[in-house]
């Protein structure tokens, strides 16, 4: 499994709805609210054989209320 972090910027007033929708899909390991430019950050494990962009698009990015996302790929855990 590959670990990626996805940050979500939500439309005004939609953060809790987006968080509930993400949680309901049962595809993230951890989900946090954050300060700064993005409202939420999720830790996601993606199957090695999966294309990251397609997998995230199919599983998460169609949720209403998401204005923007930022995906960070990881390499080595220390």
Image (spheres, rainbow, N blue to C red):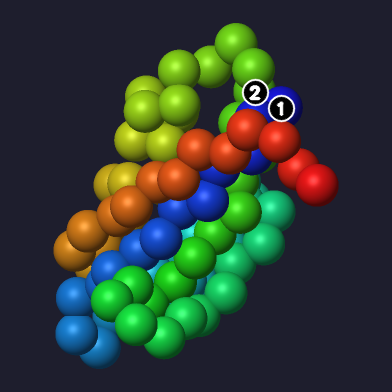
Give above or below for 38 relative to 68.
Answer: below
Give above or below for 21 relative to 45.
Answer: below
Query: How far from the left and from the top, in percent, is residue 52?
Result: 45, 26
Please give the name of the residue rendered at 63% of the width and 33% of the height, measured from the top-left corner.
Answer: 75
Query: How far from the left and from the top, in percent, is residue 3?
Result: 64, 39
Query: How far from the left and from the top, in percent, is residue 42?
Result: 54, 59
* Apparent side of residue 62 relative to residue 75 in the rendered image (left or right): left
Please give the name of the residue rendered at 19% of the width and 85% of the height, measured from the top-left corner.
Answer: 12
Mark 1 is surrounded, within 10 Å at the Cα level, by few (under 14), some (14 to 19) or many (20 or more) other residues, namely few
Distance, label 2 to label 1, CA atoms, is: 5 Å
Residue pointed to by mark 2: 47
Q: Can residue 58 be seen from the camera position used here? A: no
Query: How far from the left and from the top, in percent, is residue 44?
Result: 60, 46
Please give the name of the residue rendered at 37% of the width and 24% of the height, measured from the top-left corner.
Answer: 54
Please give the name of the residue rendered at 76% of the width and 43% of the height, measured from the top-left corner.
Answer: 77
* Apparent side of residue 76 relative to residue 49 in the rendered image (left or right): right
> Is 23 or 30 nearer to us in this picture?
30
Secondary structure beneath dot 1 equals loop
Q: Can residue 53 be seen from the camera position used here? A: yes
Residue 29 quadrant: bottom right
Which mark sits nearer the N-terminus, 2 or 1?
1
> Is 24 or 71 nearer to us in this picture?
71
Residue pointed to by mark 1: 1
């Amino acid at each position: 499994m590959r670990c990626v972090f996805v940050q979500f910027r939500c439309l005004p007033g939609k953060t809790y709805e987006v968080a509930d929708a993400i949680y309901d899909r049962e595809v993230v390991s951890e989900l946090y609210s954050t300060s700064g430019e993005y409202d939420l950050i999720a830790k996601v494990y993606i199957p090695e054989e999966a294309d990251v962009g397609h997998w995230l698009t199919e599983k998460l990015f169609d949720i209403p209320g998401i204005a923007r996302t930022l995906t960070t790929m990881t390499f080595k855990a220390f």
